[in-house]
Image (cartoon, grey):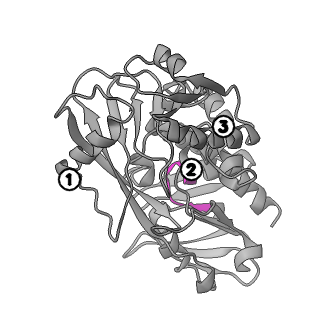
Amino acid sequence: MSFDFDATVVGAGAVGLACGRALAKRGLSVLVLEREPHIGQGVSSRNSEVIHGGLYYPTGSLKARYCVAGRRLLYAFLDSHKVDYRRCGKLVVATDEAEVARIETIFDLATANEVEALEHLTGAQARALEPGLNAHAAILSPESGVFDSHGYMLALQGEIEDAGGSVVVSTPFERAEPLPGGGFTITAGGEGGAVLTTRLLVTAPGLAAQTVAGRIEGYPPLNIPAGHFGKGVYFRLTGKAPFERLIYPPPIPGALGTHYRKDLGGQAVFGPDLVYVETEDYSVDPARAADFERYIRRFWPGLPDGALTPDYAGIRPKLHGPGEPQPDFQLRGRDDHGIPGLVALFGIESPGLTSSLAIGEAVADLLHHD
């Protein structure tokens, strides 16, 4: 049977585009469907734009493996496509003696995860690098950085289109039906939309992962993990950025905690925190500034009063609720759901952006062996 496309990807965020690129690199005709008017308007547009080293994730997990591999691929990709980034490094800071054991655990985990060039720093050494920092001790991860995530996604789109593929926006995925001999019929585009056929299907729609999977005929409902919205807000500093490197306190349950970054425009941004919400609410309550100030002064006592202004909010597609253990990325292929030619992605939150190129290659490998 002939198909309109070899592969169709649902979702044109960083991970969906990386999947499309990986499939296009293997000579497949690729279509990427996006419901929003532009690429990268979902989870990928509301994050820290941090390139993570791979410090925090359980050794052997997909998060650990794909973060380290993805970071290495990402820097090479950004160089080759002249996308702006700054490999500024990260300090994970113990602000008092009680936090030293926690950052030592992170160091050991990161070493097991093969994160390169890590260093133990005394408080004095950390303050020599970043005057004004309150540090009892710290870990330096020089491979961490910040980058232009939108420029990155435009470059991914360019590679897909250069290979003859298409990225189609304002075209929501409606449903998919497996065909008897393999492949799928897909309906997309809303009222009066298009019907097309594809041999392979990848779903990478971020917050809509569960909804999209539920619209694939024959996808077992019990195989769709429960999803949760983990909202985080960001505040921007009025005034000069105090530090050159990323500054991270020890992680909080379920997330990495409110951290500091100097963005590519030279401004200081703090966030995100973590609050579970029921709807996609991207408002930022200015009253949250007081909590941010208290938290930030643990590692930057010199934060001036009233210097934080509300910036933006993001929502992470979490697979765990409050107080539950944080699960791994889920890349579900035929062995999981029983449908040949389909890979469904769930829970691609941090470090999904850093991991995106590695996730794309992993998805292409899964489909190649299907």
Cβ–Cβ under 8 Å for marks 3 and 2? no
In this picture, residue 77 sits left or right of residue 207: right
N-term-proximal mark, 3 vs 2 = 3
Occupied quadrant, residue 139: top right
Marks 1 and 3 sit apart, C-alpha to C-alpha, by 35 Å
For mark 1, what is the residue?
Answer: 285
Mark 3 crowd level (few <14, some 14–19, many ≥20, 10 Å Cα): many
Span of residues in magenta: 8-16
Percent x, y for residue 158? Answer: 55, 39
Quarter holding the N terminus is: bottom right
Pick the residue in front: 117 or 178. 117
Circle 2 residue: 352
Residue 335: name its quadrant: bottom right
Q: Residue 108 sits in which quadrant?
A: top right
Q: Which residue, given by chain and number where applicable, does mark 3 sit on? A: 107
- Is 335 drawn above or below residue 159 in the view shown? below
Badge 3 amino acid: Phe
Q: Which mark is residue 259?
A: none
Q: Three-letter amino acid code at disc 1?
A: Asp
Give the structural element (helix, strand or loop) at label 1.
loop
